[in-house]
Image (spheres, helix red, strand yellow):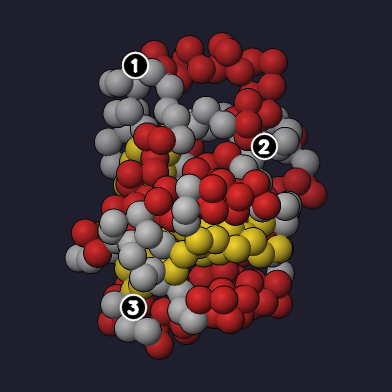
Amino acid sequence: MQLTNKVAVVTGAARGLGRAYVEALAAEGAAVVAADLNDCSDSVAAVEAAGGQAIAATVDVADGDSCQSMAELAMQAFGRVDILINNAALYAGLKGARFEQLDEDQWDRVMRVNIKGTWLTSRAVVGHMRASGGGSIINIASLAAVFGLPYGLDYVASKAAVIGMTRGMARELGPDHIRVNAVAPSAVMTEGTEEFFGEKFEKAKAVIAANQLIPRNLETEDLTGTIVYLASDASRFVTGQTHMVDGGSWFL
């Protein structure tokens, strides 16, 4: 196992990609804090059923005090934090529109969760990582940030900011042996993606697959290997990078 004796915090862990990350990290030996505004009991139960170790934490990533409480819970339960997966983001349920017609309140919510949330959760755990000699922060970006997603400029801008934050954080935290990388997937076949595309989901799947060098849709299990690699010591000299997991849609 690649993550034995490691402790991971995963935000947005109640379903979809977040739950897949929780299960994959636990399967490699990590103790996992599954954190979300929503109930994470199913994610925790899946880990425990497989013989792993996980606890649930309620967190609002856009609230600094809530993020600090999440980090404190991790420390109380497991005594350290080695890995942070910044997965929580607004995506499903967003109302797409031409950029000049986007709802201003929605824009502000997206920036608060997707950008400020990444900063606040990282801020909450980085002192614990530093105290234990290092760690790995993995920020979930998106192909949309570099390819450009029409009618979703709020989401595109937020994920482009995550890539910029990744590079800046990597420069600041390198001397502390804390690695910071981003993973930028294309559209993953989860409940959130289906909600995002709505009635156009099947058409979107076909268009996305047709524009990739590997002509099929991205599934959660296609991403978990990259996450485990970046969380593990196998990537101990890799930082500041954006890893495209997109079937060859974009060369960065």
Contact between marks 2 and 1 (CB within 8 A): the answer is no
Tell me if residue 241 comes above or below residue 67 in the rendering.
above
Could you tell me residue 7's position as x and y percent? 44, 69
Amino acid tagged 3: Gly
> What residue is shown at x 32% (from left), y 83% (from top)?
133
- Residue type, label 1: Pro
Say whether residue 18 is left or right of residue 3: right
Question: Is residue 168 among what the camera can see?
Answer: no
Quarter in which the C terminus is drawn: top left
Question: Closest to the observer: 207 or 146?
Answer: 207
Image quadrant occupied by the N terminus: bottom left
Viewer-side label of 2, 3? 3
Q: Nearer the viewer, mark 1 or mark 3?
A: 3
Residue type marked 2: Ala
Q: Position of residue 246 (x, y in %)?
A: 36, 32
Question: Residue 134, which numbered label?
Answer: 3
Q: CA distance from mark 2 to mark 1?
A: 24 Å
Whether residue 216 appears in this view of the structure is yes
**Mark closer to the chain start, 2 or 1:** 2
Q: Nearer the viewer, residue 218 or 22?
A: 22
Apparent side of residue 148 relative to residue 46 in the rendered image (left or right): left
- Within-10-Å neighbours for mark 1: few <14, some 14–19, many 20+: some
Q: Which image quadrant is residue 2 in?
A: bottom left
**Residue 215 tag number:** 1
SS label for mark 1: loop
User: Residue at label 2?
Assistant: 92
Q: State the image coordinates of residue 241 (x, y, percent, origin top left).
A: 30, 56
Q: Is residue 228 left or right of residue 69?
A: left
User: Callout 3 environment at 10 Å: few (<14), some (14 to 19), or many (20+)?
Assistant: many
Vertical order, 78 against 228 (above or below): below
